[in-house]
Each structure stands twice: as structure tokens, then as C-alpha cells.
Amino acid sequence: MSSAAPGAVHDDDTAHLHRLGYAQELFRSMGGFQNFAISFTIISILAGCLTSYAIAYNQGGPIAITWGWLIVGGFCIIVSLALGEIASTYPTAGGLYFWSSKLGSPAWGWFTGWFNLVGQIAVTAAIGFGCAIFMTSLFNLLWNYPNSYGWIYFLYGMLMLGAGLINMFKISITAFLNTISAWWHMIGVLVAVVILGVVPDHHQSVSYVFTQTVNNTGLSGTSTHGIVFIYVFLTGLLMAQYTITGYDASAHMSEETRNASLAAAWGIVMSVVVSVIFGFILLVAVTFAIPGAGPSDTGTFIVQHIWQDSMGNKWAEFLLLIAVVAQTFCTIASTTSASRMMFAFSRDRAVPGHQLWRRVSKRDRVPVYTVGAIVCLAFITPLPALWWGYVGYAASTAVAVIGLYIAFVLPIILRLRAGESFERGAWSLGRHYKWIDWLAILWIFFICIVFLLPAFQGGIPFKSNFDWNLLNYTPLPVFGAFLLFGGWYLLSGRKWFKGPIRQGTEEELARIEAGFESPGTPVSSPAGQA
């Protein structure tokens, strides 16, 4: 951490942002821990690990839960290192799309930005809907609240409305909530682990937790051995990969973070490292608590049934409360991050209606219109779950993973291509960037292919037992996005989208900061150039 006085640090941050072409429109009030906290909150081991636990259990079993988490976690740390280096050089709210534009071209920035925005909306929806599922579990135990998907969706709507309203307030309030959230997650995991270790009368063996296999996919019957099971195991990695997403939030919040060139990079990396450690402890504890005969229900409410069957309703209610509070924090933080990304993308005129979405409230310096847009778009994203249940929810998690990780990999490819000409920031990988970037790229290409594949026997097209309810719908929105954004760029976008563009001269940037005047028509040179 820099030893410079706070005022000097703020001046340096503002000067750096000016060099990148933007005015300091947002309040820069977050510290390094708060920057870490928003990514740690969005990863949310008490959200992703638990709401998608059924995916790994049915598609591999305990071995996919424990070893799968460690494999995915290790590669995600590699990806976070690659992203952290670039974030240190370009600490802007645009994050990934700005990086691709600077290191590549407007076309690279266009595709990175749109996949990032789609991924941000999808992950916000998946987080919020997963929270609504757990909230339904808790309310069902407390007050016999109906657990149908219609009533889950109602709770989801109320949750997103609340997340939107909270995000209308100034960033210091959401930053404070993220600080509380970070401690809630770490202490909550430790409390849950102690309860799961002490209260149940029976625990599974170490062999069960680390070697037991389950195949509820119907692929090759119910076989838990051989090549088919390796395929099943790989599709089950979606639980871990979905959980460890959204850590680009530290980059999107960099314009609101002090000493951003260092803090944003550390926020990205440490949020993943800490999540991998605490997430592994939590997953092991939950899996040890599985009753001897296995969960009484392996569907949407699997975690609730594990806790009920092993400890009774009261303890299950207590642990559900811990998880629901954490997941609510996570939904609020994801809404924050997504709104900042959409604001930055709109600031450079890439989003239809950008004149509205790039507006910032004068009093609190919050992009309130993008907050509202994210809430509305996220609300309609999980609609397929009303018809296809948990499969629809699982598809939305896969879309979130692929959308975000496509946006992750593009700037990493460009940074690797830049080689030694890359301008390093306050935090860099030094000579290690080559092998780190290559591993990150190969892993992302691998998971994007795996999560497009059919996960269930009945979901394979042209089979006699084909069932629409088991189809992996992920390829439809992913390839649809490629066609939509690619066609849009070729037909129109390439004529007017020039990537990040300066908001004005130094004097004009200062005037915007002083009075929040409309920047008007930006000058035509790319951001960061004279």
C-alpha cells in the first residue's frame, strides 16, 4: 500500500484516470479492503457453492465437489493473476472492454464489452435467483411458504427490487455493506463448519468425501466408472466454475477506489485466493454431513435436505439464515458491478440509449439509470426456470460462466500478444506473464467447450428418450449472442464504434468533475491518446 497522503493518492488516481481519457465522475471513496470485498462478495462461497451444489453432486458426486473445487480454484487463481496485471495498468470502470480496446482494436473491445455485459447480467440473475431458492427453503421451514418456482420467482423479484434501491444510494453505503459482507462470509463459513462438524450424529468417511462417485445424469446408465464418468465429472465442474466468477468487479469499481492501480489488482487476485480456501472448507464440511443413505432429495433443495436430515429443522433454519444473508449481500454487490460496467460501456456510446445510461446523479454520483436497467434485465433472465425448473437455472449459470470468461480471455490474449511492449502498472507478473497467460487461455477455452455439451442422457438431441426439460440450453444464448453482436458490428457498429474515447481536454475533464456538465460530443481520439 502506498505511504502517500490520502489527498496525494486521490490526485494520482485522478491524474491516471485523466490519462486514460475520463473525468472523475464517480466518488473515489473505497479502500483496498472494500475493493477486495466486492469481488469476494460476488464470488460468495455461501451463494455459488450451495445454490449449485446439486450440479456437482448429480454430475460426479463428492469427488466432483471436493477435487473439482480444487482443480477449478487453482486455474481461477491463474486467470485472476493474468487479469490483475492488466487491471493495474488500466484501472477504469470499463474494465475488460477498455483493456481489449487499448490492447487490440475497437472490434476486440466491442465483443469483450458485450460478452462481459451479458455475463454480468446473467450472473446477477443466477445469484439473485439462487438466493431466492434458499430464501424459499428458509421461509418454507419457518412459515410453510410454497416452494414452487412461481413463488421462488416472486421472491426473486422482491430481492432484485431491493438490490436496485440500495444501489441508488452513494457508493460509501454499498462499500460499507461489502465490508460487512466479507466478514459475514468468512465468519459464517467458520460457524457453519463448526456446526456441521459437531451437531450431526453421523459423518461420512474421508474416503466418501474424496473418492465417492455419483452419476445421476443417465449417461451410460448410472455407471460411475470409465470414460463416460470423466465426461460427467467435467460437466460437474460447473458448480465450482460458476461460483468463482465476477471477480472482475474489482476492476469495474476502480474509479471509486483509492490507489486503484494497486488495489484493483490485489482485489481481483486475493478475492479468488481467499474464496478458494474458504470454499473448500465449506464444501468438505457439507459433504461430510451427508446422511449415510445420501440426501433425501438431490434436486433444487439438496443442501436444505442434507442439513435437515443430518441435524433437524432448527439447525437447518439457522444455517439457511447465514446463507441467505450472504447471498443477499452477493446480489447487491453483483448489481453494483454490473451497473458500473454498463455505465462505462455506455459512456463510450456502445449501448443503445447510451445518453441515458451514462448519466450520473449529481448528489451521490451514482449511475442510477444503469442500476435500474440491470435490475430489469436480470429480472427477466431466469424466466426459463418457470418451465424447466432447475435445468433452466443451471443453464443460466453456464451462460454466466461462458459470457464472463469469454470476456476474460480476450484481453489476456491481447496482453500475451503485446509481450514486452505492454505498459506495466504498479502490480505486474514480470517475466512470469507468459506461462500464466497461456494456462489461463487454455483453461478458459476448455471450460467454454465443456459447458456447452449435454449434461444429461435425456437432453441429447435425436435420441429416442429425448426430453426438452433436460436439454442444455446454454449454446442457444451463447451462439445467439455471437450472431447478434457480430452481425450488429459488421452492419453498423464498425462504422461508429471507435472504442474508448476521450471526454475532453484536461480543462474540460476538470469542468465535468466540478459541475457534472454533460461532456457533449467526445473528441474523436481514443482514450489515452492526445
Image (cartoon, helix red, strand yellow):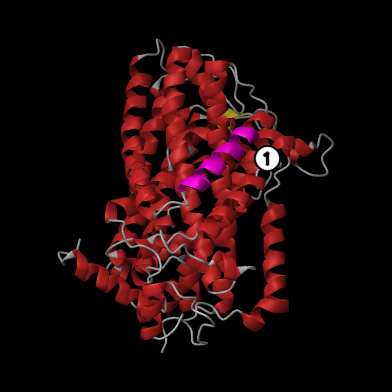
Question: Is 118 or 201 nearer to us in this picture?
Answer: 118
Q: Quadrant of residue 289?
A: top left
For residue 465, side relative to residue 14 (left or right): right
Q: Position of residue 170 (x, y in %)?
A: 40, 54
Q: Is residue 22 above or below residue 37?
A: below
Q: Position of residue 107 (x, y in %)?
A: 59, 76
* Residue position marked by numbered label 1 in the rendering: 392
Q: Position of residue 179 (x, y in %)?
A: 32, 45
- Indicate yes or no whether the magenta region holds residue 13: no
Magenta segment: 153-166
Q: Residue at x 56, y 78 (%)?
A: 106
Main secondary structure type of the part rendered in magenta = helix
Question: Is 167 or 490 nearer to us in this picture?
Answer: 167
Q: Is residue 512 above or below residue 323?
A: below
Question: Is 78 or 363 nearer to us in this picture?
Answer: 363
Q: What is the number of callouts on the image?
A: 1
Q: Is residue 500 above or below residue 440?
A: below
Residue 298 shows up from this direction:
yes
Please tell me how crowded label 1 is: few (under 14), some (14-19), or many (20+) other residues with Cα within 10 Å. Answer: many
Q: Residue furthest bottom?
A: 530
Q: Residue at x 33, y 62 (%)?
A: 28
The C terminus: image quadrant: bottom left
